[in-house]
Image (cartoon, helix red, strand yellow):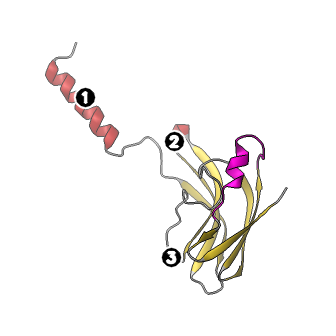
Amino acid sequence: MLGRPQTAFWLTAVAVAAFSGLSCGDEPSIEILQQALSPDGSKVATAFSCEGGGAAGYAFTNVTLQRAGEALDPFDGLLGKHKSWRSFHDIQVHWADNKNLEISYRAWSTSGVNAEQLATRVLTRDGVDIHYDFKD
């Protein structure tokens, strides 16, 4: 049985580990599937796949839009309510002009809880209107 000083030590150690941002998961692994630079070169649209999270991990495909030179944030995707759900595939991006981005994509499933997931999309970001084309 542990005495009070030992118990306090272990409780403190567990609390520090829990609140210090330590995790068993790895940094996400990102694979760029397609990148398209806007005609004026100021923004980039990136279709990508992402894996991570260790044993309880995640794997998903999505698309981002950011200013050229900014780091890609895989959890700031344009498709879906839940950014880390594996819902989308075959994503293609195309710039119509500097203010209009076209994204075509397919879904693994269109029924059940995925219906809300598919209906959630970012319509504009940083002055760019985003147009979606869902492929059956």
Residue at left offset 24%, top offset 28%: 10
Q: Looking at the image, which residue sits at the far right? A: 136
Residue 102 relative to residue 11: left or right: right
Per the rendering, the mark at residue 54 is 2
Specify whether residue 92 is painted magenta.
Answer: no
Query: Residue 16 placed where, x, y %?
Result: 27, 39
Q: Distance between the Cα atoms at labels 3 and 1?
A: 44 Å
Q: Looking at the picture, which amino acid does disc 1 mark? A: Leu
Q: Quick check: marks 3 and 1 in contact, CB under 8 Å?
A: no
Q: Distance between the Cα atoms at labels 1 and 2?
A: 25 Å
Label whose residue precedes the other's in the sequence (3 or 1):
1
Residue at disc 3, secondary structure: loop
Query: Which quarter of the figure is the C terminus placed in?
Result: bottom right
Q: Distance between the Cα atoms at labels 3 and 2?
A: 29 Å
Query: Residue 4 placed where, x, y %?
Result: 15, 20
Label whose residue precedes the other's in the sequence (1 or 2):
1
Q: Residues within 10 Å of mark 2 (few under 14, many from 20)?
A: few
Q: Is residue 53 above or below residue 95?
A: above
Query: Residue 76 placed where, x, y %?
Result: 55, 60
- Examine the image and state in which quarter residue 104 appears: bottom right
Residue at left offset 76%, top offset 48%: 108
Residues drawn in magenta: 108-122
Q: Main secondary structure of the magenta part?
A: loop
Task: From the image, tell me which residue sits under label 1.
Answer: 11
